[in-house]
């Protein structure tokens, strides 16, 4: 592979990764995150407290078994995925995956509880 092609692929991959991380969630949407390192109720409580303190947060759900953290935006507000990721990593956990979903935190919670 040519050097220019390799640089282009690397730059494109970086751009796609950055755009996925920096996307925001609006009212009616939630940011659903897979998090490694959560092992106890204290871990879940710490993450929930940090994310609940964000001004745009309406609701937070943390599920240790499925390693899921879901944050829902308040009406008229947007959630910044970069900020959510920073709060989780600053608390000492690893963000594995983030996605914006058209579900409330209650819907995500019900869906996960149905899997148990």
Image: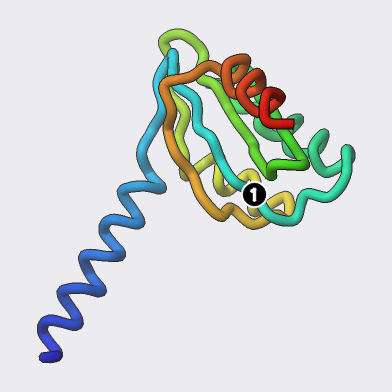
Which one is in front, 37 or 15? Answer: 37
Q: How many marks?
A: 1
Q: Residue at x 12, y 81 (%)?
A: 5
Q: Residue at x 51, y 50 (%)?
A: 97
Q: Residue furthest front?
A: 115
The secondary structure type at the circle numbered 1 is strand
Q: Position of residue 112 (x, y in %)?
A: 65, 28
Q: Residue furthest bottom?
A: 2
**In screen coordinates, is 13 left or right of 87?**
left
Q: Considering only vertical position in the picture, is 4 above or below 46?
A: below
Which one is in front, 107 or 4? Answer: 107
Which one is in front, 106 or 79? Answer: 106
Quadrant position of the C terminus in the picture: top right
Judging from the image, the colouring scheme is: rainbow
Q: Considering only vertical position in the picture, is 102 above or below 99?
A: above
**In screen coordinates, is 16 left or right of 81?**
left
Q: Residue at x 76, y 42 (%)?
A: 65
Label 1 belongs to which residue? 35
Q: Position of residue 51 (x, y in %)?
A: 66, 32
**In screen coordinates, is 62 left or right of 24?**
right
């Amino acid at each position: 592979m040519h050097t220019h092609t390799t640089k282009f692929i690397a730059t494109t991959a970086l751009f796609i990764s950055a755009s996925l991380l920096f996307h925001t969630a609006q009212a009616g949407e939630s940011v659903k995150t897979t998090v490694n390192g959560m092992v106890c109720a204290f871990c879940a409580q710490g993450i929930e407290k940090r994310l609940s303190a964000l001004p745009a947060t309406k609701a937070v759900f943390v599920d240790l078994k499925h390693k899921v953290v879901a944050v829902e935006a308040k009406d008229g507000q947007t959630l910044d995925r970069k900020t959510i990721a920073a709060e989780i990593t600053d608390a000492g956990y690893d963000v594995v995956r983030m996605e914006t979903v058209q579900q409330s935190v209650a819907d995500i919670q019900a869906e996960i509880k149905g899997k148990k």
